[in-house]
Image (cartoon, helix red, strand yellow):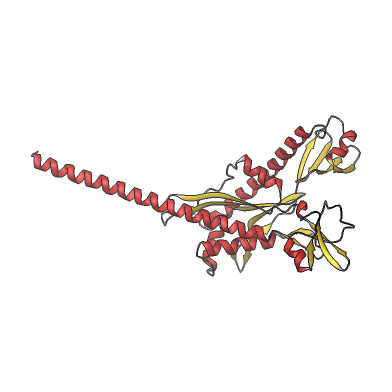
Amino acid sequence: MKFTNLAILFFILELSLFTILDIRINNLTAVANKITKYNKALDSAIDDGVVGLVELDSKRSLVLNKEAAVNQFYESLYANFGVIGSSISENRLEAYIPVILVTDTKGFYICYSDTYEVNREILTSRKWSERIPYSYEENNLIYNFTLGNYITIFDKTTAAIYEGDYRDLRTRFPGSVLADDEIYDTVRRNAIIGKIEEKMNYYINRHNRIAYHSGITYQFWLPRIDKTDWYRTIDDISMLVVFQGYPYNAAGLDTYNRYALGGARIKKSKAYFITVENRFKYYHKESCDYLNGGGPAYYTKEECALEGAFPCLYCNP
């Protein structure tokens, strides 16, 4: 073969190689840009959702509104992904979210997909599980943990129920998990996480069958959730979303997979109480020495100001 022919062949091979590399680099760049875009969209949506997760009822007590939180999450997600207003695209996007977890003080809820039939057509809708307690069984005792120190214990032998701060129940159950603070906290956390993982696995596997009938061949699975994120989830009322299998392009060879977490982060230490002194209203911290009586709780200074109350000069809330 002549040298010129070899040179031409080498040039063609080199050009083909650089073309392939250029295409791959462009694809990787496009995927990286979409990852950034999708991360922002998902983070924004869950932040919008948890805003409505906890609200005040008519007695100014904190109540969970998981329906409002999930609806707001999806509305924000539709908008951020540019599909809002198109029911087909919205439903398609929802299909890539197998479960949404909401943790409450005494248990958790899972929002999952379910099917129903209308005029021989199979449709999909969102449903909520019943509240699932943070339960743990040892010997003849069933412990129902909470996100705090409160606990309910059922004795299967006597059918008696005990409840209260776990430290106050220690003497009644010597040698149990209540005996040591560190052991109790470890058992409580592991029991809560284990119960959540068990139920999330169940509903994710259930979602695989529903997604398959919707034309999605992706195999959904429970991702490995970082321990720090698990602790954030069970330290307060929170919402966790699993988003998997969303294709970056029409070919669908690579998919976007991520979980996102948002916490309500509302603590009782932030509660304020209003008193009336010499016809003037003042709001105080819960620990204020000049706070006489209880009354309704307010959870922001702005709420207190709307009631015409001034800040207490002593506790400086």
Residue 6 place in picture, x, y as percent: 13, 40
Q: Residue at x 77, y 46 (%)?
A: 146
Furthest residue toward left:
2
Occupied quadrant, residue 166: top right
Report the side of 236 relative to 11 (left or right).
right
- Which residue is found at the position 75% from the left and 49% from the top? 107
- Judge whether residue 138 can be spotted in this image: yes
170 and 117: which is toward the camera: 170
> Would you place residue 42 above or below residue 148 in this image?
below
Left/right placement of residue 57 relative to residue 163 reads: left
Direction from residue 195 to residue 144 in the image, left or right: right
Q: Position of residue 217 (x, y in %)?
A: 50, 52
**Along the line of sight, the residue nearer the viewer: 256 or 58:** 58
**Residue at left offset 39%, top offset 51%:** 29
- Viewer-side residue, 48 vs 306: 306
Percent x, y for residue 279? 87, 69
Q: Is 59 placed above or below 148 here?
A: below
